[in-house]
Amino acid sequence: MREIANHIVDRSPEVQQRVADGRCAVVGLRYRLSDGLAEPLVSYGLDIEGAEQLRVEELHKS
């Protein structure tokens, strides 16, 4: 997951610029089918420090 998020940012100047401008974020999540939790692993443009695991239903509320 980390490699994929890194690849998205590293290979796209457009994404890099939007992240730098605060208009976009790239977040790599680990999703567990067993309990429906998504755990943030890596982030560009969004502070995930101390972020808890989220249920997928909570992500859809935003």
Image (cartoon, rainbow, N blue to C red):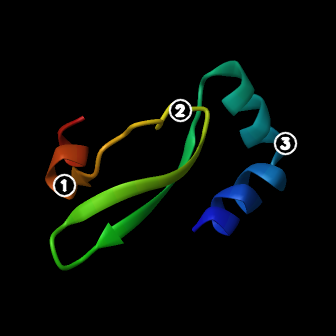
- Between disc 3 and disc 1, whose residue precedes? 3
36 with respect to 20 (left or right): left
The disc labelled 3 sits on which kind of residue? Pro
The disc labelled 2 sits on which kind of residue? Leu
What is the distance, in whole Å, between disc 2 and disc 1 at their CAs? 18 Å
Q: Say which element carries label 2.
A: loop
Q: Name the residue under label 3.
A: 13
The disc labelled 1 sits on which kind of residue? Arg
Q: Mark 1 points at which residue?
A: 55
Query: Picture coordinates of residue 18 (x, y %)?
Result: 70, 30
Residue lying at the far bottom in this picture: please name it.
34
Q: Mark 2 points at which residue?
A: 46
For image coordinates 61% across by 32% down, the residue present is 45
For image coordinates 17% across by 39% down, the residue present is 61
Query: Picture coordinates of residue 42 (x, y %)?
Result: 56, 51
- Between disc 2 and disc 1, whose residue precedes? 2
Query: Picture coordinates of residue 21 (x, y %)?
Result: 70, 20
For image coordinates 36% across by 40% down, the residue present is 51
58 with respect to 14 (left or right): left
Within the image, what quadrant is residue 34 found in? Answer: bottom left
